[in-house]
């Protein structure tokens, strides 16, 4: 653990500047608005270690792959979210001496992420060698109401000297991805406008022809009065700057405003980008910083009304969950069905900004409960729109008849990851995509979705399972060979219980949905079946698979086995491992990991999490105890699911311990890797640990159900659930549970197994403490 930030309920606060931690802070202090994001970099020049990062959702690059042995079926490229033109930059000199925190003497420093209103603030007092002492206050945000706008306000006071301040506000398109496979640069210049204090740079990707237009306008005020700027313009390839000088006296306050517009050809015709950028800039400058900032605060207040979790009695936990919710809301807003949630969001380059099964398996529940229904629906539509690519992907691997294998890692629906054990073998992702449809519909009751889109996806996935399953003459059962389950510390195993379970479940669910659509939307049913050239005989095979699927089971232990042969492994417990051997993925050879019984992340338990109603308490507890004690939790997605399961079986202490491992994963840099970006998708897991874990939120027969418990350290906690047009506040203390219905209509809820009706604008109070 590496806690250096101050605990505060609404803010992330760094009180001293440690250059060694700068990259971590840059990740943690990232800003985003669902459409784009920016790491917490400094605006002024900084010659120390930094990863400057600007990312625009959906603008990626098909980087050339790097593999040892090429395998047929591998994707041709590895997609990378692009580090995009840098818009925040201001090079600032006082009397010719640069303001650079790597070379100045730092007398005071604060970096604050204000999560309530959605901005980043920095204040510092430094001595610039050869100039004097200055004080600075900087605020920056990326607007979530004007989603193509970002703005910086940079105020400076020279404390003990007078002279000339020179500021060069620039746009830099000469940027590079740190993770580029061959150290290549991916951008070319495609246009530039520069005049007085305004510049626009149009950059184009070397492949795929994405265009990004980055515009800026600078304004400078001296003691509150706008100064007339006589800017020198600086132009070089992929770089445009407007440079101005201002005379100042000691104690003058000089405030630089930099308004930015970031547009892309995803949303504008390429030939209109320049004109539209001028327009967005005109609007932003016209509104002014304060008005833009006020809109930002209002927009964030709306987000918090729908998604906040309040914890009393544990400030570190409060800050942790708010940070997670803030980052999730910054990463995805559901405004654009082409976008999704990269495991690092907009906070770093790792995982290439691509979409993983993380979205459906971990993130969807957060957006289902914490935002309008259309947000979660947009996540489903993303996969619907990628269906034809998923079918092509399966065809490349030899599947036929419209079978779909969704990619493990994708930007545009094509697979873009090529490690065979993941690309070809982690086919369980198809299950999570089918489950997301089930999860969305049971939450929203939007059954029309099944007829309009869901059924097509389910049939295509079922066709895949049907072909990927084979008959074993020896077992007289269906088997699925050569897979990697969620536990990536085992590859090429036969009959991974989780995968087999998902295959059977998907086939069964697809038949149910097909019957439902036939009975309720007969026209649609005909149309879909015709479009997909569906034959009744397909169902026959599906039914055979459903009834004769093989599930590895150890009779003696009474346990479902993670895969066939799991018990052949030398059985050891994580508690027997020497702490110096952890994390295994850094200390052990891959070969040793594969041979060991140790598990990276929930696998059987991940399946029991999804299908808990099919198992009784005793079975769940038995499997939890067996598998958790062999799990090293070396994926950030592991502890959260185990925490939910521990809550489910009443192991409160264990649930809390596991929750702690996820709650402040990045804030306390548990895994020593926050410098590469935040674990955005695992943040949704933390939310799960509270809402589904401690709160026991479920949907039972179309009704919301809760079974709340409260961690010992907390005095109360509350969370919000959007459910079918109703917003509920659930408040849990040691003595009572309150459920407030904020809507006008009544809602039925189940609390500790009893059903209650809560009228519109009413509160249900249940005393839980014994008299
Ligand atoms: C996990 C995967 C996950 C990926 C991206 C890996 O470490 O094992 O389950 O999809 O990270 O978060």
Image: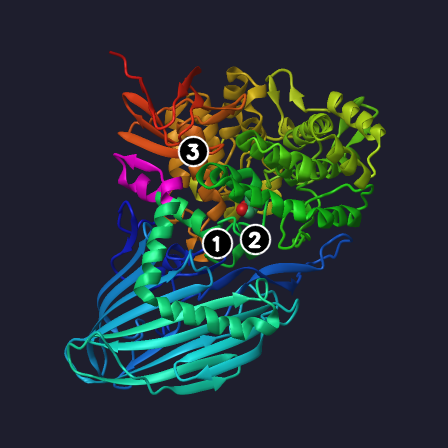
Q: Which mark is residue 34?
A: 1
Q: Quadrant of ligand 1?
A: top right
Whole-number angstrom distance, CA of label 2 to CA of label 1: 8 Å
Q: Residue at x 73, y 35 (%)?
A: 524
- Which stretch appears magenta? 304-321
Task: Report x, y in % for residue 142.
Answer: 40, 60
Whole-number angstrom distance, CA of label 2 to CA of label 3: 24 Å
Task: Read off the residue under disc 2.
Answer: 339
Depth order, front residue of 108/742:
742
Q: Which quadrant of the rendered structure holds the C terminus?
A: top left
Q: Is mark 3 within 8 Å of ligand 1?
A: no
Say whether marks 2 and 3 touch (CB < 8 Å).
no
Q: Is residue 52 left or right of residue 483?
A: left
Task: Report x, y in % for residue 538.
Answer: 82, 30
Task: Read off the residue under disc 3.
Answer: 721
SS category of the residue bearing label 3: strand
Q: Residue furthest front?
A: 744
Q: Which mark is residue 326?
A: none
Say whether marks 2 and 1 touch (CB < 8 Å).
yes
Task: Report x, y in % for residue 747.
Answer: 44, 24
**Quick one: label 2, few (<14), some, or many (20+) residues within 10 Å?**
many
Whole-number angstrom distance, CA of label 3 to CA of label 1: 21 Å
SS category of the residue bearing label 1: loop
Q: Earlier in the sequence, mark 3 or mark 1?
A: 1
Q: Residue at x 57, y 45 (%)?
A: 379
Task: Report x, y in % for residue 535.
Answer: 84, 32
């Amino acid at each position: 653990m590496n806690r250096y930030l101050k605990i505060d309920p609404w803010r992330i606060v760094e009180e001293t500047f440690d250059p060694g931690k700068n990259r971590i802070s840059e990740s943690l202090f990232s800003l985003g608005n669902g459409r784009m994001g920016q790491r917490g970099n400094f605006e002024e020049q900084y010659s120390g270690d930094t990863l400057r990062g600007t990312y625009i959702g959906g603008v990626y690059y098909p980087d050339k792959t790097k593999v040892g042995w090429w395998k047929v079926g591998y994707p041709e490229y590895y997609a990378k979210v692009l580090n995009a033109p840098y818009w925040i930059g201001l090079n600032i000199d006082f009397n010719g001496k640069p303001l650079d925190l790597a070379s100045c003497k730092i007398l005071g420093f604060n970096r604050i992420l204000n999560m309530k209103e959605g901005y980043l603030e920095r204040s510092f007092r430094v001595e610039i060698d050869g100039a004097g002492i200055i004080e600075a206050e900087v605020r920056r945000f990326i607007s979530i109401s004007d989603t193509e706008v970002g703005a910086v306000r940079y105020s400076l006071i020279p404390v003990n000297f007078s002279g000339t301040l020179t500021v060069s506000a620039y746009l830099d398109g000469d940027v590079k991805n740190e993770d580029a496979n061959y150290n290549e640069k991916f951008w070319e210049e495609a246009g530039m406008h520069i005049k007085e204090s305004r510049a626009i740079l149009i950059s184009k990707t070397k492949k795929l022809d994405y265009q990004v237009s980055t515009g800026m306008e600078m304004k400078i005020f001296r003691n509150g009065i706008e100064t007339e700027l006589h800017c020198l313009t600086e132009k070089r390839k992929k770089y445009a700057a407007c440079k101005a000088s201002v005379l100042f006296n000691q104690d003058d306050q000089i405030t630089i405003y930099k308004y930015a517009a970031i547009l892309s050809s995803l949303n504008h015709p390429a030939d209109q980008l320049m004109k539209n950028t001028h327009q967005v800039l005109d609007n932003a400058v016209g509104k002014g910083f304060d008005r833009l900032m006020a809109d930002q605060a209002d927009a964030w207040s709306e987000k918090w009304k729908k998604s906040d979790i309040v914890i009393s009695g544990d400030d570190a936990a409060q800050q942790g969950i708010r940070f997670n919710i803030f980052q999730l809301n910054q990463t995805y807003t559901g405004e654009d069905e082409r976008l999704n949630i990269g495991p690092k969001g907009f906070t770093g380059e790792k995982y290439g900004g691509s979409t993983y099964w993380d979205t459906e398996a971990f993130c969807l529940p957060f957006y289902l409960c914490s935002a309008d229904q259309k947000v979660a629906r947009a996540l489903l539509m993303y996969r619907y729109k990628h269906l034809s690519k998923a079918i092509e992907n399966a065809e490349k691997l030899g599947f036929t008849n419209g079978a779909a294998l969704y990619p493990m890692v994708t930007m545009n629906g094509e697979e873009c990851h090529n490690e065979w054990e993941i690309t070809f073998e982690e086919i369980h992702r198809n299950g999570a995509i089918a489950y997301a449809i089930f999860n969305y519909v049971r939450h929203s009751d939007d059954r029309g979705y099944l007829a309009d889109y869901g059924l097509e996806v389910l049939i295509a996935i079922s066709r895949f399972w049907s072909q990927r399953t084979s008959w074993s003459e020896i077992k007289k059962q269906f088997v699925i060979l050569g897979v990697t389950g969620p536990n990536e510390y085992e590859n090429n195993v036969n009959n991974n219980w989780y995968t087999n379970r998902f295959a059977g479940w998907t086939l069964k669910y697809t038949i149910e949905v097909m019957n439902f659509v036939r009975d309720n939307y007969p026209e649609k049913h005909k149309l879909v079946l015709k479009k997909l050239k569906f034959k009744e005989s397909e169902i026959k095979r599906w039914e055979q698979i459903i009834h004769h699927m093989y599930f590895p089971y150890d009779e003696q232990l009474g346990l479902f086995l993670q895969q066939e042969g799991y018990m052949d492994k030398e059985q050891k417990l994580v508690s027997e491992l020497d702490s110096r051997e952890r994390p295994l993925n850094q200390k052990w050879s891959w070969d040793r990991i594969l041979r060991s019984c140790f598990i990276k992340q929930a696998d059987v338990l991940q399946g029991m999490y999804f299908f808990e109603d099919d198992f009784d308490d005793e079975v769940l507890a038995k499997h939890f105890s067996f598998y958790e004690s062999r799990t090293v939790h070396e994926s950030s997605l592991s502890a959260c699911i185990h925490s939910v399961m521990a809550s489910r079986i009443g192991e409160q202490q264990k649930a809390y311990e596991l929750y702690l491992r996820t709650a402040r994963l990045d804030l306390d840099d548990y895994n020593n890797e926050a410098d590469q970006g935040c674990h955005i998708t695992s943040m949704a897991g933390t939310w799960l640990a509270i809402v589904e874990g401690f709160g026991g939120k479920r949907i039972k027969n179309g009704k919301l159900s809760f079974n709340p418990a409260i961690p010992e350290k907390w005095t109360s906690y509350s969370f919000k659930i959007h459910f079918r047009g109703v917003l509920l506040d659930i408040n849990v203390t040691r003595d009572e549970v309150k459920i407030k219905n904020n809507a006008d209509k009544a809602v039925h809820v189940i609390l500790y197994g009893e059903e209650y009706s809560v009228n519109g604008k009413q509160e249900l109070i249940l005393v839980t403490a014994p008299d």
